Image: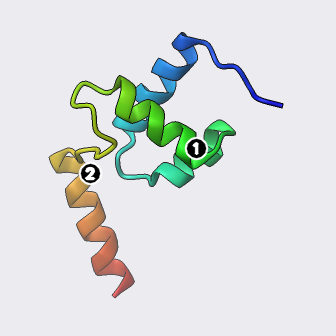
Amino acid sequence: MVKKFSIEFKQQSVDYALSNAHLSISELANHLGMDKSTLDKWIRQLSPNKTSRRELTAEQQRIMALEKEIKV
């Protein structure tokens, strides 16, 4: 059975994905209860830059770098 999602839910999901660029699309899709390819498609369709590539803020980049240092 195919799930139907409202445009509002799609846009909220895309906004959530864009604001959580430090998480993978797979992690985000799992949290939202959908398939990774669905979320990826919505991001490409609804994001301002029309791509599923998400940019990290400087703060997110710094956090990721620090997390990598700790793991090493």
Sequence-wise, the earlier of marks 1 and 2 is: 1
From this view, report whether residue 17 is shown above or below residue 10: below
For discs 1 and 2, the disc positioned in front in the rendered view: 1
Q: Secondary structure at mark 1?
A: helix
Corner quadrant of residue 24: bottom left
Q: The residue under label 1 is which amino acid type? A: Ala
The answer to whether residue 37 is left or right of residue 14 is right
Corner quadrant of residue 34: top right
Q: The residue under label 2 is which amino acid type? A: Gln
Q: Position of residue 1 (x, y in %)?
A: 84, 31
Q: Residue furthest left?
A: 58
Residue at which label 1 appears: 29
Q: Residue at x 33, y 88 (%)?
A: 72
Q: Position of residue 45 (x, y in %)?
A: 38, 27
The answer to whether residue 26 is left or right of residue 16 is right
The answer to whether residue 71 is left or right of residue 31 is left
Task: Give 60 or 56, whichever is nearer the viewer.
Answer: 56
Residue at which label 2 appears: 60
From this view, report whether residue 66 is shown above or below residue 10: below
Q: Position of residue 44 (x, y in %)?
A: 36, 34
